[in-house]
Each structure stands twice: as structure tokens, then as C-alpha cells.
Image (cartoon, rainbow, N blue to C red):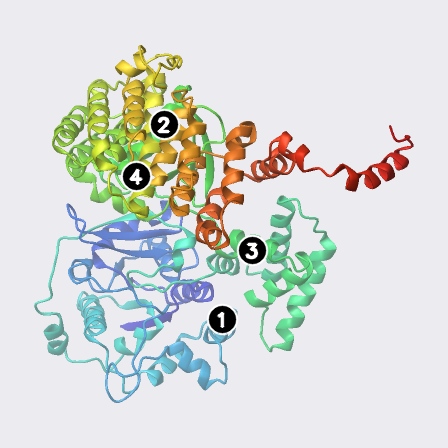
Amino acid sequence: MSVSILGVRHHGPGSARAVRAELARLRPDVILIEGPPEANALVSLAPDLEPPVALLAHVPGTSAGAAFWPFATFSPEWQAILYGVTAGIPVRFCDLPAAHTLAVPQPEPEATEPQPQDGPEAGELRVDPIGALARAAGHDDPERWWEDVVEHRGDTPFEVIAEAMAVVREGYRPDEREARREAYMRKTLRAALKEGFERIVVVCGAWHVPALTEPMPPVKDDNALLRGLPKVKAELTWVPWTYGRLAWWSGYGAGITSPGWYDHLFAAADRPVERWLAGAAAALRDEGLPVSPAHVIESVRLANSLAGLRGRPLAGLSEVTEAARAVLCEGDDLAVELIQRRMVVGDRLGHVTDGTPMVPLQRDLRDQQRKVRLRPEALDRELDLDLRKPLDLTRSHLLHRLRLLGVDWGVPGVSRGKGTFRETWTLCWQPEFDLALIERAALGTTVSGAATQYARDLASGSLADLTALVERCLLADLPEALPEVLAALSARAALDTDVTQLMAALPAMVRAHRYGDVRGTSADGLAVIVHSMVDRICVGLPVSVTGLDDGAAADLLGHVDAVHTAVALLDEGAGQARTPAPAPDEDGGQAGTDVVRGATPRGRWLVTLRGICDRQDLHGLIEGRLTRILLDAGELDDAGDRMSRAMSRGQTPVKAAAWVEGFLSGGGLLLVHDPRLLALVDEWLTGLGGDQFIEVLPLLRRTFGGFAVPERRAIGERVRSGGRRAEAVEAELDERRAAAAATTVLAILGRAHG
């Protein structure tokens, strides 16, 4: 009867090769691996999986948390699993059960390996065991030392590692969690011995080797540690993982920052440096960068030379990176970043088979992904959708349903095309999305059903939340959830008296109303709610514009602009043509039109703005913006007179500047094409005193700084050439003083003085 303890580095390629070779030599009849024992039934699925994958432990029916145990091809534990399953040898996990681990959630450690304590008092000083060994060997870089003495050798001396760890752990007392983990490992080992296994191999982190070798603590002490542990019902399954996520710690594991490099070291045991740099050259050529075989040869020579100068047995990641930077990339950091992203980290996403235990919601998503021909990928992928095409519309519905469920596989972007029938998405699959699907599994067996139920559960909250939810239901095509959400929205809108909330909610509602036209989704019931909200806004807005400070005026101005755009879209969607502006009556007002009578939402809105605009108690920012809106809508013909009054000497410079800011917030083209308004602004500015100009300068910089560069240039040209009246310019000319200059100019042009 023999017990072999193989201490490894999690995700170490050299350790993985050494474990495989040691298992072939020892020919064990049972293999114990650090990991949750609830996963024993899942071991047989491993040969059909495509790593990187992870064991996911979760508490069904709750969102109480989860734990992941990731595995890559180069993980020693993964190679041990494959060896055991292929050879028909029992493989068992021996770490603390996930039922206990999830019952007491633990914070993620900052370091990449368990941090042992060194010193007379437990918890006083925490050191890295690999770091301690590296310092004892005279090295200041623990990672590089470990790679040199273990990973790059390929023949990990397990007895030497065990002896070294025993020395490092002298006087060390593990904390409660670690003590329980090691107690359970010993319990599993004793159970295997009791079952009569003759050749037992344990694969665990090197740090735990001394805890599993003789002399072990008494059985009663371990039982006392494990007695009364909190426990929950835990379920486990395999889920896809990514190389980018291998740097994320959970379960037993340690994170690594260069999984692509480690994968290469494991797969390319022959001439790894040459193969790596040749692959880097190919990646650069794929991006159109000129890299020749001569570059590869020189970079290999440089990497090996650097390794020799530094006393390393093999060029490591730092040497090949420096060689690539100097030779392949010619010092270009962007090219080096490309190699880092594509090769050092890698973009690999694992895959699990259909035989893997899944909740129905996960299976339905896999079926939907096949139906819409969208494969999960680890790197960002741009996707442009034309909603007029059935396949693209189905893809859009799926992505919006997943976003509603908290699975942000796709993130919407700004469409590069014109029209509301186009969508742009950025797709990137993350491993934790499987956990989100498991947490939402109780909502339904399909993505559509779960999203519908979740929308119903969210049918409460503020008015803005409900309007956003209506929009999301329409985007996701959830007609069964829409009536309930609309009913909640109608009840909330009827009770909400805050006009700013109504104004904030209206744009989303109008957009939702339009989706019935663009996406073929029924939006029955929305029109009544939208028109009711417009009426409430028109009634409540005049009361809300009184007594505003600068911040409140700016906030209200944003709502006014948004509502103005929304009501225009609402009228446009209803096929209502814009009513032409009528001729003014004797008082300068306008009468006898559908706009005044409020026959349309836009008409009612403009009537409201016109009534507010004539008041004397408005903040300058609000008054100026309403004047501009009404002018652009063709509802005013006395904008010049209003500007003159706003900039008269009876107004304070600050209020006048705020009026100008509000009036010009829609852009500066109006000043380019209306000489009268430009002249009014010019005369007001030039008439300010020094102190007054300094007082209003910040507002003016904010106003004119928001204009596009061509607009500012055109305004400057207008001011220089025609900002003042031609008569005034002509009157200011001194013909006698200008005669000499005119004569010289005419002589240069070759013309006689007329």
C-alpha cells in the first residue's frame, strides 16, 4: 500500500506534464484531486469537453453566490482527470465540499496563491511560499524562479517540492478555513485507504503537501474541525471558461496572467521559443504588418541571448516579449499589445457538450444560438442588424431578452446606418452568464418565457423605470408581459404629479410607441397613455418654471428639449403634417390655426410654450431656449424684438448672457444666416463694460464653445465683414486719410486713379 502526494502549481504546464508522466509510472488504482467532491459524478464527462472549462457550484433557486474551479489543458488536475478516466481509474475530488464553501462565502484573495503565515503568531505575517523559496535561492522574482526550476524543466521533482514546502511551513498554523480544507483532504485520503486501494495518488497544490504526509493529526482532531459546519444544498455542473478569466480566482485555484503562453509551453514541448515567435510574426502579418522570416530568426537569437545573459535555462515570456518588441514590432507598443492580447492571454473559449447537466433555460439558449447562427465567442465581435430581415429581427429579440435577464452577451452601440431599422451590437460571452441563467432558471424554461415573467416581476417602481421597462418589452418582443406593465404604468402616471418625472418618462414612451411601426410589434394601449402624459405635462409645466436657480433651469431645459423632440416624433408617427405658421394678428400673436387650438400633441405643446414664453418671471436660460424653439417651429416673428429686450440695459448682464445661452443652445447657424440677430448679439457684447464682460465671460465661453468649428469660423467672418451696418461703416471712413492707401493699391493693380 502506497500513497504518493504530487504537489503542483495550479495551471502550471511543467507540472501538468510531470503529473502525466508520474501517473504513467505509478499506475495508481485511485486518484484524489483537490476540488469539490460533489463533482465526482461529472468527472466522466471530461474527455468530451473542450477546455478551458470550469466546475460551477451554486445554490439552486437562489442568488446566494457561486464558486468556480477552472481548468485549462495545461492544468495538472485536468491532465490527472483525463488520465484516470481514459485508464478506467476512479477519480475523486478531495477538497472541502461546495455545500460548506457556499454556506460561508469567502472574499477573493489578492494574491495568486494561498498566502501562508510565517511567525510565532498566526495571522501576523503572511508570505508567499514560492516567494520564500525564491528569496532563499537568491532570486527576487518568485514567478520567474518557479518557471526556471519547475515549469521549464518538465521533470518536476515532487519529492524536492514536498521537502521545500515542509521547510516553509515550519511553525505555520493555518487559519480556520484552510485547516478545515486540509482536514477534509485527510479524511478523504483515510477513506480511500480504508476502502482497500493499494496505490493512491493525491494531486493538490504544493502548499498542502506537508498537511497530507505523515505524521498526520489524529482523526479525532480532524473530526472536531469538521463538526457542525454550516451547509447548503449545492449543485455542480461544467460551464465554458475563457483564458482571459483564468486570471480570476475562485474555488481552489490560483489565477495566471499569461494563459496563452502557458498553453503554448504545454503544447509545444519541442522548440517552444521558435514556435512562439513564428506565431507572433503570423499574428502581425494578419494585421498587415510586414514581418519576414529574417525577423523571426533574429528575434529567436535575441531571446536566447537574453536568457543566457540572465542565467535562465529557457527564454521565458519576458525574453520573447522583449525580442518581439525590438525585432518583430520595431519598438511599436501597439503591435506588442496585439501580441499580448491575442497570444499571451489568448481568446479561447471552452465548450461543454449537450450531455452536460444544464437547466432548461441554458438549453433553450443553446438552441436559440444555433437557430440564429450566433456562436458565443470570448473576444468582442461587432454585429450589424437590419431589422427588416427576419433573421436579424430574431437576433435582436434574443439579445434584448437576454439583456432584460441580466445576460449582457450583446451590448447595443450607435448604429452606423440611418433609420430606426438598424442596430449595432458588440458581442462578447463571459463565463458568469451561465450563472445568471441558472439564477433565472425558476422564471421559465425558455428565454422568452423567463424574460416575460421577469418583466412582470419588475412592473413596479418609479415612472421612469416603468417607461424604460415598456420600451425594453417592445424591443424584446414580449407581448404577454406588455399589458401588465402598461397597466402599472398607467396607474403610476395617473398618480404622479411631478412634471419633471413625466417629462423624463415621455421620450422613452414615444420611442416605444414608434416601435409598432419599425419592428412590427403591437403597441396597443400606448397611445392613450402617451397623450395623457402630454396633457399632464402641458398643464404642469407652467407651474414648474417659476423660481428656478441656474442648476434647476439647466436640468429643466434638458427635459424641455427631450419632450420637444418626442412630441415631434409622435406627430410624425401619426402621419400628421406640420401646420404652417399663420400670419400674426394685430397683437403680434397667432390665431385661427390647429396649432393654437391644440389639435395635435405638438400643437398643444407649442401653445404651452408660447404661453410660458410671454411671462416676465422666467429664468434667462429658459426664456431664451423657449424663444428659439418657437422661432424654429415658425411660431414667432418677433424674435429680434425679444432679443433686443433681453439684452437691453434694463437687464443684468448675467441674465442677458443666460438668455443668449438658452437661445443659441441649438447651434450657431442661426447667427450665420440671420444678420439682424447677429448684429444684436454683437452690439450687446461690444457695449458691455470691462467688469460686466468678465462677469459674463464664462457663460459666453460655454455657449460659443459648444458650436462646431465651421460655425464659429462663419460667425467670425460675418462679424468682421458685416457685423455692423454698411451705413455706419461708410460714415466712419476718412476719405482723405484713405486716399494714399487707395492710390498705392491701384498702382499695384496697374490701374490709374479714377
| Label 1, residues with CA under 10 Å away: few <14, some 14-19, many ≥20 | some
Identify the element where label 2 is drawn.
helix
Upstream in the sequence, badge 1 or badge 3? 1
Upstream in the sequence, badge 4 or badge 1? 1
Apparent side of residue 352 relative to residue 661 in the rendered image (left or right):
left
Image location (x, y in percent) of residue 605: 29, 23
Identify the element where label 3 is drawn.
helix
The span from disc 3 to disc 4 (Cα, nearest Å) is 45 Å
Q: Is the residue under label 3 in contact with that under label 1 (CB below 8 Å)?
A: no
Apparent side of residue 177 relative to residue 698 in the rendered image (left or right):
left
Residue 515 seen by the camera: no
What's the mark number on residue 565? 2
Upstream in the sequence, badge 3 or badge 4? 3
The span from disc 3 to disc 2 (Cα, nearest Å) is 44 Å
Give the amino acid at mark 4. Answer: Leu
Image location (x, y in percent) of residue 452: 20, 30
| Label 4, residues with CA under 10 Å away: few <14, some 14-19, many ≥20 | many
Q: Which residue is mark 3?
A: 337
The span from disc 2 to disc 1 (Cα, nearest Å) is 62 Å
